[in-house]
Amino acid sequence: MDSVIYVAGHRGMVGSAIVRQLKTRGEKNIVVRTSKELDLRDRKAVNTFFDDTKPDFVYLAAAKVGGIFANDAYPAEFLFDNIAIVSNVIDAAHKFNVKKLLFLGSSCIYPRLAPQPISEEDLLTGSLEPTNEPYALAKIAGLKLCDAYRKQYGCNFISAMPTNLYGPGDNYHPENSHVLPALIRRFNEAVRDNLDKVECWGSGKAKREFLHVDDLADALLFMMDNLNSAGWVNVGTGVDLSIQELAENIAEITGYKGEIVWDTSKPDGGPRKLLNVDKMSKLGWSSKIALNDGLKNVCKAFLKSKVND
């Protein structure tokens, strides 16, 4: 009999990638629910769902997410809702004897000024980035809850900490998207409108690491198969590049020939954010999708999407 696999947050960027990867593997008993069908903040509803479906494995990728503005405007909702989601699902996984749960964290859990590259041991060694502190605190609570349930009840609950992601399902909103999709939209529109200048925020000197979401999904399935210990594991490429290099790469891929202007009156954010992926490498997994290859595929998909209309 096939194992029952529940993917919480299947409509999100990561959750949908997990479902794609599971289907590629040949898994047929994948259970999903929309937020309208199952409110994960409702403990009774979550318990009823677990009792009815009896999942063997759980990927917890559901979360209330948003940009800097949303985090700043609704800190109580971001903290309460995300803590409710992780506590309800993790507790239900224990109550209804789930064989294994994988909790998806975020690299924003690490201190704002953490040493580079950031290792798992750097958690709680400094202050968080204020602009997403409520979200980060809820994610920290989730991974600590996984370890607490492992220690007290013997639950096989594990956690993954991904770096910056890109790929199918990304947010290309002109005002609140992250840097990589924002640049893809900006340069494609510049080509479409025959612009001779594209303005980018900051100095371009800040460095960031980017992982394709399909690579992350591959890593998460690998962890579900091979990791059975407490703690959390960083998932990334182990390689970063400057935002200027990223912009130049996207310009080349999109065919933009004009000038790139950097508005240094706008913030760069942290100077660098790179994860130490030694722990994951020792487990036997490494990323497979080269950034330029991933960017080409994403740009091609963007051009075909309604987002570009």
Image (cartoon, rainbow, N blue to C red):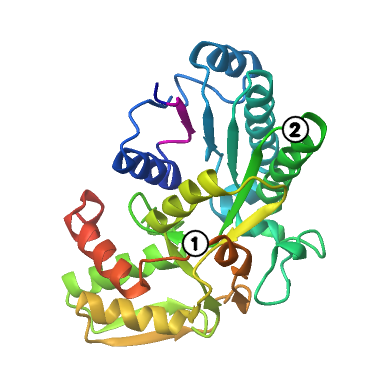
Give how far across and how far down residue 33 sits, in percent: 43, 24
Query: Which residue position holds label 1?
Result: 285
Task: Check disc 2 and give the amino acid type.
Answer: Gly
- Expressed as whole percent of the image width and height from the top left, the position of residue 105 reads 61, 49
Horizontal side, residue 211 vs residue 185: left or right: right
Q: Name the residue under label 2.
A: 154
State which quarter of the image contains the N terminus: top left
Residue 100, percent across and down?
59, 34
Front residue of 202/116: it is 116
Disc 2 secondary structure class: loop
| Pointer 2 or 1: first along the chain | 2
Q: What element carries label 1?
A: loop
Mark 1 residue type: Trp
Residue 258: where, in percent of width, then height? 25, 87
Asked if 305 appears above or below 115 in the picture, the reply is above
Residue 142 in the figure: left or right of residue 234: right
Above or below 43: residue 296: below
Can you say whether 11 is above or below 124 in the image? above
| Disc 1 residue crowd, few under 14, some 14–19, many 20+, Cα 10 Å | some
Which corner quadrant of the image does residue 79 belong to?
top right
Magenta-tinted stretch? 3-10
